[in-house]
Structures are given as C-alpha cells and as structure tokens.
Image (cartoon, rainbow, N blue to C red):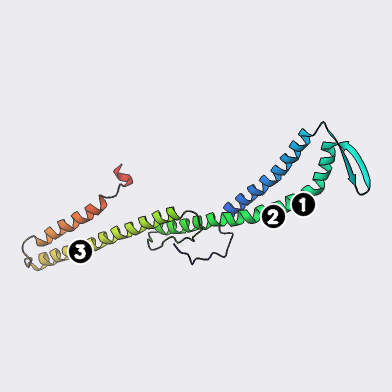
Amino acid sequence: MGNSIKRRNYFIKKDFQGKYIFNAFLLVVLGSILFGLMLSFFSSNTLSIVYDNYHLQLGTTPGILLDRILNTQWLFVVLGGLTVVVLSLFLTHRIAGPFFRFEKTLDSMTDKDLTRAIHLRTKDEGKELAGKINEFNKQLSFDLSRIKYNARDISRCCSNIKASEKNGTEDPEGPGSNLEQLEALNSKILEILDQYTLMDDR
C-alpha cells in the first residue's frame, strides 16, 4: 500500500510525539539515577583508592563513585538523551503518521465524503487496520450507490404515475406496472439496508 509515499514532516502529531519523547527521556534520566543509587548501596561498606591527576585518594567507594558519576553522568544523560529523542522521533513517526491518516479519513467519512482511502508506507504501523477501514469505506460506498440508483428509479416511477394521473391516461406498460416497479425497487433498497445492524435496531 503506497510504497511511494514520503513523509517529510516528522512532527505530525506534536502532542502524542512530544509526550512519548519526553517520557523516553525521563526514563533515561531516572535509569541513570537508579543505577547510581544501586551502585552506591551495594558498595557502601567498601573503600576505594583512586589515582587521579598525580594525586592518590582514599575514600569510601560510594563517595568516590558519586564524584566520578557526577563528572561523567551529564555527558551520558546528554548523549543518551539525544539518542533516545532521535530514536523516539523516528519510532513515533511510524505510529503518528498512520494515526493522522486514520483521523483525516474518518473525519471525511463523518462529513459524508467516502472518496478518501488510507495509504500507508511499507514500514508504517496499522496497515491491517487501514485495510479494514478502506474495505468498509469501499463496501459502504458501493451499497449507497445502489441505494441512490434505486431511489432515482423510484423518483422516475413516481413522476410517471403523477403524469398519468394528471393527464388522465393509462400506463402504457399496463395497469399497475409502475407500482410493481416501485415495490421491486423498494425491496432492493430494504435488502441492502437489512445487511446492516443500525443503532436504532437494537
């Protein structure tokens, strides 16, 4: 479906994508804090010796580790956070794009426009749902077209009956032929409508 579709705008649904990216970044920050706390807890009863910049330092392992983590953690948070933001942007793009197309198509259907179809890229999520919506849209359009044609034929038969009554002439196709056609056309419409379960039917 739509392999040639190119989506240049990566922020399609800003609220959804922004919330997802923020949560992913927050997860990285909390993970870093949790890692530091766990490391400090399990090494709380140990001592460490550090040789740094021609100085020998002796101290508790959590204190020394905390100092080293604070010196390097900001770099990890920044680089890791940027990586998470970029990856989250690409991942949400494959979800937000289909959501955007679903909403636009359903909005059109709500506005009684059944000509729009959902076209997704190869790697987009929701292709099965898009196929089902497109199939429903196609079937509904077909059924409504049949109802429309039958309704037009009903209008034609009604016009013939009115003309016959106005002119006082008999139906050239035989008595009651237009009424029989009306009944047949109405039966076709009811046959189509009976295939649907409507809210008023429950």
From the image, state whether disc 3 or disc 2 is nearer to you: 2
> Along the horizontal axis of the image, is 137 left or right of 174?
right
Residue at x 64%, y 48% (from the top left corner): 24
Along the line of sight, which residue is nearer the eye, 43 or 157?
43
> Residue 101's mark?
none
Picture coordinates of residue 118 (x, y %)?
A: 44, 60
- Res. 107 image quadrant: bottom left
Q: Decide: few, some or many residues near mark 2? Use Cα within 10 Å; few <14, some 14-19, many ≥20.
A: few
Residue at x 68%, y 46% (from the top left corner): 28
Q: Secondary structure at mark 3?
A: helix
Q: Secondary structure at mark 1?
A: helix
Along the line of sight, which residue is nearer the eye, 76 or 56?
56
Distance (Cα) linking label 1 and label 3: 75 Å
- Residue named by callout 2: 82
From the image, state whether disc 1 or disc 3 is nearer to you: 1
- Residue named by callout 1: 75
Residue at x 58%, y 54% (from the top left corner): 91
> Along the horizontal axis of the image, is 137 left or right of 79?
left
Q: Decide: few, some or many residues near mark 1? Use Cα within 10 Å; few <14, some 14-19, many ≥20.
A: few
- Residue named by callout 3: 153
* Amino acid type at image mark 2: Leu
Along the line of sight, which residue is nearer the eye, 9 or 87?
87
User: What quarter of the picture does the N terminus occupy?
Assistant: bottom left
* Amino acid type at image mark 3: Asp
* Amino acid type at image mark 1: Leu
Residue at x 93%, y 43% (from the top left corner): 56
